[in-house]
Amino acid sequence: MSSVNVDKYSRSLFRPTTVLVEDEASGYPLTESILGRLPNAEVVVIKRPSSENLVRLSQQFSPHTTLLLGLHRGRFLKACPGTAESYRCCLYQILHLGLGCNIGCSYCVLQGYLNNPFITQFVNLDDAFAELDRELERPGVFYRIGTGEFTDSLFMDPLTDLAPRLLDYFGRAKNAVLELKTKSVAIAGLLDYPGEIGETIVSWSLNAPRVCKKEEGHAATIEERLTAAVLCRQRGYRIGLHFDPLLYFTGWQDEYRQTVASIFTHLKGDDIIWISIGAFRFMPQVKEVLKANHPQTNITAGEFIRGIDGKQRYFSAIRRQLYRFLVTEIRRYAPDVFIYFCMEDQYLWRDTFGFAPADNQELSHWLDKCCYRYTDKGHVS
Amino acid sequence: MNSVNISSCYLADIDFDDRTFPFSYGLLPAPLESSIANVGLLQPPLLVAGDRGFNIVCGRRRLEVVRKLTDGAEKISFYLVENSNLKKLFRRALWDNLALREFNLVETADIYVAALNIFAVDELEKEIMPALKLPLRPRFRQRCQAIAGFPWKLRDLLAAGSVDAETVDLIREWSTGEKAALIDLVEETGLRRNKLREVVSRLDDLARRDEVSALEFLSAARKAALSEGGGIDVELLRGHLKALLYPHLTAARREFAIRQEKFSWPANLHLDPPPDFEGGDYRLSFIFTGSKDWEKICSKLTSVDLEEIDELCQRG
């Protein structure tokens, strides 16, 4: 594969001017390589910060321009937090390699979850891979693993060069697939990767053009994301798409119709491994944070009720309208593509699709079956 | 320390309008009035020479009470401090007040805003804001600055505790006209704290949702809530705003009630849908006082058409 020289694909969305390095993170290869790519950045070595110290540090160093390099001391592989059992979740696994992102989406749930104001990269990758080795040894278990839950998987990949490291590992892992979720187009590391990519999925979060423009900070445009998806598909990656969060606003039908049409001018149904859909939801306390961080947005000013999981979500009649419309639109172009809901209840599953997973395990199984690598025994024979 | 001298002056010599040291705002405490009415001013206030008389550093509430009780003709004793170091005087007044009481929202805001012009950022964040129990986050700073600029009627309501901090955050960006209309509503209806916050929150959501002024919704809600006597019925007002903000949910509730009517159930049998129709569990309950009631209800329940039940449980 020839090297892609298009600038935007090799540009990190985050270019810190200051790097805080935990003293114990010094000397790690990832620390050294990141610092090597930031020759002009101010480097400050700090002791492992407590939550209070992080707040204090954020008054000294702007989180908008500062990267924190540290060690992760807990488990790297975690179950996706999902939500209460009353809503179906897909039992996804998260590989926890970093925290935060600077794209600046108004609806980002991380605003309410993270107590660390800094974009953080964990540098003890060998510990992560050692843990994966132990975990993936379990017989008969298939893993769908993503890195894009507490951060965007690729937004600063040109800086961390993490994607090739992950491909080195997951390209040969037989009972696991890696999904990299992003709103960026920093895909040069994926396109230039010379080795076996296995069944790695590159996924883009998509939305209505108006939402992209108004609510998604400096994410790539829908057109840019889909163009990047085409390049990744040409390189052999499978493509995932995530309509999450769907927003309800005047003219939403035309806007989402436009995005769906745009998908299928770039990709064929067969190119897409799955499409997830989830209507906007948020913990009640996030409303104030969101209004403070994004005073111009009005996305929380809708018909929200309190769900069984305590989250604010659109009243079900609105979710139903959104889901039925979007699924119908997608099916017009790709009748067989696998579509699923993220954190939705069985009533709306049945109402939209005519069937519903009996439990989270069944939904998980349906997603596993979308992967070539999966067999009923849990791995490739 | 500043040097302190005991002096005396008439109340008329004190510049009550000066708010360099804005440590009190709001109603005067009744126990203080009783105390001064019975035994006079025991603790002399702290004053400093100003351009138009003496400025009050500490003891404004005491002096206000004396003024109220004596029509301003009284001569009082006071401690005169040198006006050489504003920062020191401000700190002295702050800590003196804090030793005795907590500040209300308006006082906290006024003190913070006054301190902005006196202290360096570092001093503000390390001493003044923690003393005022103000977190360092922007939201709290913005709240203070908003309160300091509110119309006095609104400040009075805040100082009296009739409006809470969350409501301030909601109306912070409202226009002068919107705030004035809200004050009118509060005066007319007596809406206070929680119900007021709910009304304001709905107005704010509606205004932001439709990108129009909250005034539009407030005017419409007032019209819809006019009672027969010409006043505003608060419950009608709240219901109207709720229906505007939750049109689908309101329709679903109405449809459920209509479907339920088909059953012609006895009054002691109740069917409740899940809260906000979220989730699938409906709850049936009945009240009985003996076997006759029991039999009647059982007979009614066994005669219910199952298709009707499915129809009833359709979500809106």
Image (spheres, rainbow, N blue to C red):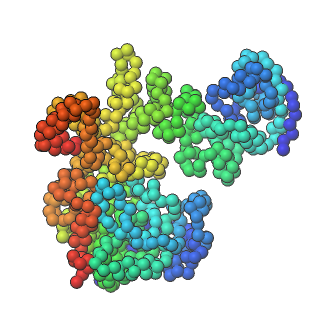
- Is residue B43 shown above or below B139? above
Is residue B16 visible to the viewer in this orientation of the structure? no
Q: Which residue is drawn at the image coordinates 63% and 29% (left, top)?
A: B26
Q: Which residue is drawn at the image coordinates 33% and 30% (left, top)?
A: B240
- Is residue A54 shown above or below A39? above
Q: Quadrant of residue B17?
A: top right
Q: Which residue is drawn at the image coordinates 55% and 29% (left, top)?
A: B157
Counting from the top left corner in percent of width and height, residue A160 is at: 45, 75
Q: Quadrant of residue A144?
A: bottom left
Left or right: B55 as drawn, with respect to A50: right
Is residue B194 visible to the viewer in this orientation of the structure? yes
Counting from the top left corner in percent of width and height, residue B83 is at: 81, 38
Left or right: B263 as drawn, with respect to A251: left
Question: Which residue is situated farthest in the top direction here?
Answer: B229
Q: Which residue is drawn at the image coordinates 31% and 38% (left, top)?
A: B246
Q: Quadrant of residue B50?
A: top right
Left or right: A349 as drawn, with respect to B194: left
Counting from the top left corner in percent of width and height, residue A120 is at: 49, 68
Left or right: B94 as drawn, with respect to A329: right
Q: Quadrant of the C terminus of chain A?
A: bottom left
Counting from the top left corner in percent of width and height, residue B284 is at: 25, 40
Which is nearer the eye, B307 or A154?
A: B307
- Is residue B112 shown above or below A121? above
Q: Quadrant of the N terminus of chain A?
A: bottom left
Count the marks: 0
Which is nearer the eye, A212 or B29?
A: B29
